[in-house]
Amino acid sequence: MARAEPADRAAVTAVVDAAAPGLGPADFAIVFGTQFPDPVPLAAGIVLAGLAPAVVLTGGANRHNPRHVEADVHAGLLSAAGVPAAAVIVERRSASTFENVLFARPLIEETLGEPSSAIAVVKWHHRRAVLILARQMPSLRRIFTVTYEPPDLITGRRVTRENWPQADAEGRVRREYAVIRRLMRDGTVDDLAASGHGWTRLPAARA
């Protein structure tokens, strides 16, 4: 993959970056499915600090290792970190980001009603997850994010906002950029603003 020039790198990063200033109490936290353990200590910290009463773990069998059910693995790690089982909601069927929310939503609403706020624990370049969460759960008015830097499966390096043109041999960042731009052009995502209090819906956004 050709190395991006600085201006191109900045433009791509700005579109895919899930981070938004601010973090506060929310109705629940959600971990989007991944084979990596990185989101677990972040989610544990959120619950143990009292920022959310429950954490939703999503993700079924990993496509590279069917015996690795992502949500179940994360549940075990959360338990080892001291998070009580009563604070954990597990969705273990999904195979995509869209399905993470699709299958988790009824579990969330059965337990918590229609929540108005969430904390999304996501890879830094997975803004698409935030957009999908907002679109599929219209009761949410505010989404805080806690992000992490995942490793690249080919290079083994952490993919950061600064080094992704070199470290991201899998091309995940550029693929996310292409998908988000398409979703925005198609009008299939709701408009969100980084308000200083996480991502909030713009007044004109569809519900």
Image (cartoon, rainbow, N blue to C red):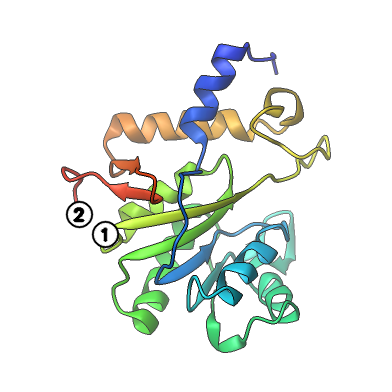
C-alpha gap between disc 2 and disc 1: 5 Å
Q: Position of residue 171 (x, y in %)?
A: 66, 30
Q: Is residue 165 above or below residue 117?
A: above
**Amino acid residing under circle 1:** Pro
Which of the labelled discs sits on residue 29, or is there none? none
Toward which corner of the image does residue 189 lie, by quadrant? top left
Q: Position of residue 83 (x, y in %)?
A: 64, 81
Q: Is residue 10 above or below residue 81?
A: above
Position of 135 with respect to 173 (left or right) is left
Q: Count the labels in the image.
A: 2
Q: Is residue 119 above or below residue 115?
A: above
Q: Quadrant of the C terminus?
A: bottom left
Which residue is located at x 69 percent, y 65 percent?
41
Q: Position of residue 169 (x, y in %)?
A: 74, 30
Does dot 2 land on a helix, a strand or a loop?
loop
Which residue is located at x 48 percent, y 79 percent?
53
Q: Which residue is mark 1?
A: 138
**Amino acid residing under circle 2:** Ala
Q: Quadrant of the N terminus?
A: top right
Outermost residue to the left: 204
Does dot 1 land on a helix, a strand or a loop?
loop
**Label 2 packing within 10 angstroms: few (<14), some (14-19), many (20+):** few
Q: Is residue 167 above or below residue 71?
A: above
Which of the labelled discs sits on residue 207, or is there none? 2
Q: Position of residue 194 (x, y in %)?
A: 38, 41
